[in-house]
Structure formats: structure tokens, C-alpha cells
Image (tube, rainbow, N blue to C red):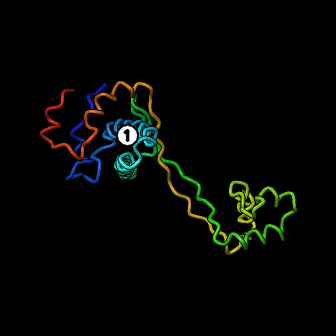
Amino acid sequence: MKPFNSKLIFDLLGPNSSQVLDSPEQIEDVMVVLNSLDRKEDFYKRLKVKRAKQIDNELARLSSQRNKLRDLIDAELDRSGFKTLSFPGIGKVSKRIKKGRWVIVDEEALIDKFEQELDPEQTDELIKQSKKIVKKNADKVFDAWAKTDDVPDFVTREEDGMSLSLTYDKAIGDLYEEVDSVEDVDSNSMEDMDSLEV
């Protein structure tokens, strides 16, 4: 397994951060850090019960770093023309189309339309007792209406987008200690990073 590139992560997340990856191969190091950030974020969520304010700040920082790294991977995949890349011993990254969501603009008008056009049994599946729409079930009706071009004005559909999927290999656990040494990239100087043992 190749050595982990902590300088790259410092460059990506540090105070004078780069906004792009130089090659698809760098995605491997970014995936290692993303996996570590996910683990840390999970730990902090559980610890949050005891120390909510401090944890909120740390979760926001980790989330911001994770989003930035995911955006860098996404941009590099677009730039290099790859849809899927595998990094043996680390994991796999892939882009796929994410189906757009239905957005209810006027819930009351939609409830009225359901009650007028659907049979009572179907309406009961879509509307809760307090006259709230069961969104998961309603999406099927919206899809059917879209096929007949009968979608009312008070329902819109978000455009389909792309989603990024990261799958990690079990062997990535061996790299955790190495990644933890760059845990506070934004608070360390480059001199501190140079003194780290790998």
C-alpha cells in the first residue's frame, strides 16, 4: 500500500487551500480522510449528549471539511471524465444520477385534489389523520400524474442531479492512525506536519 499523503490533505484543507485535485490518483488519499472524518463525526454525535455546544462546533468543522473534500472529488471526476474509480485497499468512488424529488408547494390544495380524484382507500394511504400528506406514498401518484402531464401547479419536481457514492474497503482501518495525525489540519502549521512520524 502506498504511503498516505498528509501534505496533500494539508494543502486541501489548510489556510491556503487548493481548490482542485491534480489527478484522479489523489482521490485515494482524500477518501482515506473522508472515511476518518465520517468515523469522527459519528463519535462526536454520540458524545454530543454530554457536551452539546463544543460538539456542535466540531461537527460543523468536520462537516465543512467533508463537504469540501467530497466537492473536490466530484470536480476531479468531472474534470478527468471518470464516473467510477476503484482504489484497492481503500475503496471505490462513483457518480450516478440522483432522482429529483417532488416538492409540495401548496399542501392544502394537493389534499383537496387527492380527495377529488382518488378513491378513499388510496387517499387514506396518502393523507394522515391530521390531513398531512404521506410524502413517500404521494411520490408514486406524482410520478403517475407526470406521465399524463397532469401535475398540478402546487406540486413541482426538482431536477435530477448527480450523487457521489464512496464505498470503503475493510483494509482502510490500517490507515486510521496515520490519518488521525492530520486531524486538526486547519490548526496545525506546515512545520508541525513535517515533524509527524509516518
Q: Amino acid at mark 1?
A: Leu
On screen, residue 175 versus residue 85, left or right, reads: left
Residue at 72% over, 72% down: 108
Q: Nearer the viewer, residue 35 or 143?
A: 35
> Relative to residue 191, is residue 49 drawn left or right?
right
User: Is 116 on the left-hand or right-hand side of 7?
Assistant: right
Image side of residue 16 versus residue 142, left or right: left
Location of residue 30 with respect to 132 vertically, above or below: above
Q: Residue at x 62, y 65 (%)?
A: 103
Residue 136 lies in what quarter of the image?
Answer: bottom right
Whether residue 26 is visible here, answered yes or no, is yes
Instruction: Determine whether the residue tagged by mark 1 lies in a helix, strand or loop.
Output: helix
Q: Picture quarter containing residue 91?
A: top left
Depth check: 153 or 45 in front?
45
How many numbered marks, from 0 up? 1
Q: Position of residue 159 (x, y in %)?
A: 56, 63
Q: Horizontal and vertical percent for residue 151?
A: 71, 70
Is residue 73 visible to us here?
Answer: no
Question: Can you identify the residue that label 1 sits on?
Answer: 37
Q: Is residue 134 above or below residue 114?
A: above
**Which residue shows up at 42% across the image and 35% down it?**
86
Give whichever of 117, 108 is nearer the camera. 108
Quadrant housing the N terminus = top left
